[in-house]
Image (tube, rainbow, N blue to C red):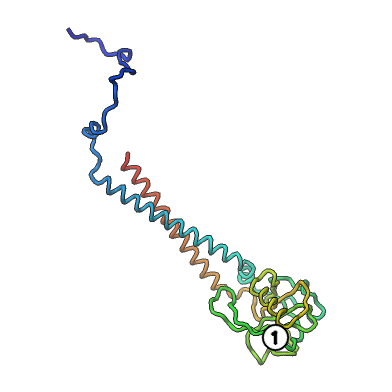
Amino acid sequence: MTSDKKPSLKDFDYFSINARPAKSSELLEHEQLPENIEAEIKSWQKERRRAGFSAITSTIVVAVCTWFLWGYRDAIAYSFSSSHPPLVLGDVVELSPSDIPHNSFVELTGITEHRGLSQKTTQGLWLLREERWNFRFVGSRGVFISTPPDSSRFGFAMRITVRGRAIDPKRDSKYAQFISEYKERFFARMQDTSRVIEVDVVPGSGRWPFILFAIFIAIIVTLDSRSLLRYLRSRRRHVGIMR
């Protein structure tokens, strides 16, 4: 004789030793996973590895480029400054190197020494090395000029008036090396403070290399962002499949 009494939770033995969960094979009989789920998972894993590698590589490239540009921060500020007249300082003999502001556009007058150095160096971000003539002004206590090679304008023991960008060699490794070489070659006694004037380098000049470099970084950042978006979309698709 069967009872019409509805089963109660009290009648269920939660702690019965015979109670056991259903086997996964039994569950699969009722609900089959999509046939291509394995291929989808492999595709997602491959996409994740590719996106992760691309993101890490792009981040490293951006970090290195940013660190590289940081060394040119003064040159960038000068290149993107507005055009303005130079700070006229007069005869260099009456000046101390510390009187010449670093990274400023100046005009001064002096007599070049009877000796100088010719070097091939890069200017700004240009990869091509250009020849530059370097002279120290007589009686300047450490003021140099770096000029393009032009014998009609520059030479030994010449009184000249020049305009250009003033640089503290302590803040520019290229000119710090030049000052060190000058001391060693000519046994020159110099003050701890010095300046180098890049002749004919005016505010607002030399922008394009920095602009092109910034575009390159922007492209890398864009690719990095696209890789991250692809990874997130792939991850959402994978989570949807697993559900």
Q: Is residue 190 shown above or below 1?
A: below
Is 49 positioned to the left or the right of 171 in the image? left
The percent coordinates of residue 132 (x first, y second) are: 63, 83
Furthest-left residue in view?
1
Q: Is residue 136 shown above or below 15?
A: below
**Residue at the spot 68% in from the left edge and 78% down from the top edge:** 181
- The answer to which quarter of the image holds residue 5 is top left
Is 59 positioned to the left or the right of 131 in the image? left
The percent coordinates of residue 144 (x first, y second) are: 72, 80
Image quadrant in which the N terminus is located: top left
Relative depth, front residue between 18 and 229:
18
Image quadrant in which the C terminus is located: top left
Q: What residue is shown with label 1? A: 116
**Residue at the spot 33% in from the left edge and 13% down from the top edge:** 10
Q: Is residue 203 visible?
A: yes
The percent coordinates of residue 34 (x first, y second) are: 24, 42
Relative depth, front residue between 162 and 180:
180
Furthest-top residue in view?
1
**Residue at the spot 48% in from the left edge and 66% down from the top edge:** 216
Is 223 positioned to the left or the right of 2 in the image? right
Is 9 positioned to the left or the right of 130 in the image? left
Q: Is residue 85 visible?
A: no
Q: Secondary structure at mark 1?
A: strand
Q: Amino acid at mark 1?
A: Gly
The percent coordinates of residue 179 (x first, y second) are: 70, 77
Furthest-right residue in view?
94
**Number of dots carrying numbers:** 1
